[in-house]
Image (cartoon, rainbow, N blue to C red):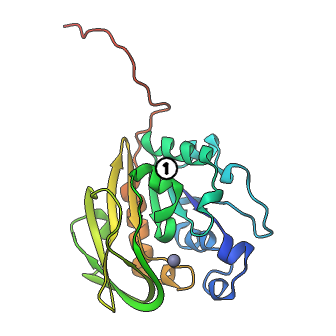
């Protein structure tokens, strides 16, 4: 079984207990994600905060956790700045050594995503109840397997272009919102040996992760991002001439 670690900042629905978020994710976004992933994957959850407001040391990131993670999911929004630089460096290094990672929704502004992209990762946004159509750009891509030509999301926060990312290696989904904006909603990259997927849907006060097709896309992305190849350390060795 692929080992998946779901990381969540756990503020809206944890520390702050916002009713409009708890309504959809009473045990936390990480626990909801775990609930539909655990039949197919070995799932661990880690949070930045505990529900009582305790800040976990190094955002819950340890070398042991990373060594036991094939693919990580990252959901963060308001407290990106509270994730220690050491944790960011450790996870980025694990990705470069071969761990897969999926950045969900507002994780576009996490220190970790910006580190791996090397750009601002800014976008246009509007908290609203706009309808989103999520369009499959490449139906042959493994992340789009079993997904219809578009997925209708009844309400989602608008994320619009321009999105300050490096050109994706592969664009799998484009979102279009009812007022007309469009967004590169599903993007793939390689960073050294690790695969990276950014997936836009998933605003905390809308029940987007309850939609079966969205769950299927996340499962497909985990399978795509998994690699059995992982180096223990990235090195730059001086080597002997090859011998015939
Ligand atoms: Zn949001």
**Where residue 91 sits: x, y (%)?**
54, 47
Identify the element where label 1 is drawn. loop
**Where residue 189 sits: x, y (%)?**
33, 54
Residue positioned 79% across, 62% down in the render: 54
Residue positioned 33% across, 49% down in the render: 190
Quarter of the figure with the C terminus: top left
In this rendering, the count of numbered labels is 1
**Where residue 229 sits: x, y (%)?**
40, 39
In the rendered image, the vertical position of residue 38 relative to residue 23, given as above or below? above
Q: Nearer the viewer, residue 179 or 62?
A: 179
**Where residue 103 sits: x, y (%)?**
46, 62
Mark 1 vs ligand 1: CB under 8 Å? no
Residue 18 appears in which quarter of the rendering? bottom right
Packing grade of label 1 (10 A; few <14, some 14-19, many >=20) is: many
Q: Which residue is mark 1?
A: 70
Residue 96 visible in the shown view: yes
Q: Nearer the viewer, residue 3 or 124?
A: 124
Residue 241 appears in which quarter of the rendering? top left
Would residue 193 be found to the left or right of residue 9 on screen? left
Q: Nearer the viewer, residue 222 or 162?
A: 162
Would residue 29 be found to the left or right of residue 170 on screen? right
Residue 2 visible in the shown view: no
Residue positioned 41% across, 72% down in the render: 200
């Amino acid at each position: 079984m692929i080992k998946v670690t779901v990381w969540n900042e756990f503020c809206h629905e944890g520390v702050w207990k916002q009713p409009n978020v708890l309504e959809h994710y009473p045990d936390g976004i990480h626990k909801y994600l775990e609930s539909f992933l655990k039949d197919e994957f070995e799932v661990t959850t880690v949070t930045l905060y505990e529900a009582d407001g305790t800040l976990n040391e190094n955002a819950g990131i340890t070398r042991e956790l990373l060594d036991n993670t094939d693919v990580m999911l990252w959901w963060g929004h308001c407290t990106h700045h509270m994730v220690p630089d050491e944790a960011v460096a450790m996870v980025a290094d694990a990705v470069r050594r071969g761990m897969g990672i999926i950045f969900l929704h507002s994780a576009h502004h996490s220190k970790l995503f910006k580190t791996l992209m090397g750009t601002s990762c800014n976008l246009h946004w509007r908290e609203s109840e706009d309808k989103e159509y999520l369009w499959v750009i490449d139906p042959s891509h493994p992340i789009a397997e079993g997904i219809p030509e578009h997925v209708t999301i009844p309400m989602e926060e608008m994320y619009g272009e321009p999105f300050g990312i490096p050109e994706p290696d592969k664009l799998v989904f484009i979102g279009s919102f009812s007022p007309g904006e469009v967004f590169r909603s599903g993007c793939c990259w390689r960073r050294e040996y690790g695969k990276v997927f950014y997936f836009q849907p998933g605003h905390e006060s809308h029940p987007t992760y309850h939609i079966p097709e969205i769950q299927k896309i996340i499962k497909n992305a985990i399978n795509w991002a998994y690699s059995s190849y992982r180096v223990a350390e990235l090195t730059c060795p001086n080597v002997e001439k090859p011998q015939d």
